[in-house]
Image (tube, rainbow, N blue to C red):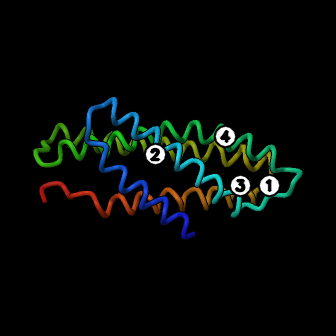
Amino acid sequence: MKNVFFLSAFLLITSYQLSFAQSSVDEEITLIQSAFGMDKKQIIEGYMDLPDEVAPAFWTIYQAYEESRKELGRERLNIINDFLSEYESIGDDEADDLANRTLKNDLALSKLHSSYYKKFKKATSAVDAAKFLQIDTYIHNTIRNAIQQELPFIDQ
């Protein structure tokens, strides 16, 4: 689990660099996701400890899951970047937009988890699918909490 905290710190440090021009933001997000994806896969691989007969099917589904999740992660980082750009002078319209985008992103991640839980369960077992969901949720919540602790509060 120490690797998870290292990933959180890395993401946290690099996320503050997201306040540059949009093309630079996209490049930073791509870099973050690339580094994070490799480390995340190693963490999941060690935690899952899959039998040889189901591992190939799991990793095929995992790759498809990660492609979908990366889009949601990219949007999450864009929301954070937009918040950091606006928080000092945020008004009702900006706050409403950021809140709605965040809620939509959270809902999309929950739907993604639900959809892929079924796919992982079919390819492996309910226990393995639940293990994946548990570690994936843990990783994302750890990162979100670390970022949230560093973000300024509105009107503060």
Q: Earlier in the sequence, mark 4 or mark 2?
A: 2
Q: Residue 97's spot in the image, x, y percent?
A: 26, 38
The amino acid pointed to by label 3 is: Ala
Q: Residue 30's spot in the image, x, y percent?
A: 46, 38
Q: Quadrant of residue 12?
A: bottom left
Mark 2 lies on residue: 32
Report the disc number at residue 129. 3
> As drawn, is 46 to the left or to the right of 32?
right
Q: Are marks 1 and 4 in contact (CB under 8 Å)?
A: no
Front label number (4 vs 2): 2
Residues under labels 4 and 3: Cα distance?
15 Å
Report the disc number at residue 63. 4
> As drawn, is 66 to the left or to the right of 145?
right
The amino acid pointed to by label 2 is: Ile
Residue that sits furthest to the right in the current view? 53
The amino acid pointed to by label 4 is: Gln
Q: Residue 9's spot in the image, x, y percent?
A: 42, 61
Residues under labels 4 and 2: Cα distance?
17 Å
Mark 1 lies on residue: 125
Label count reads: 4
Q: Earlier in the sequence, mark 1 or mark 4?
A: 4
Dot 2 falls on a residue whose secondary structure is helix
Q: Residue at x 42, y 40 (%)?
A: 29
Dot 3 falls on a residue whose secondary structure is helix
Q: Are marks 3 and 1 in contact (CB under 8 Å)?
A: yes
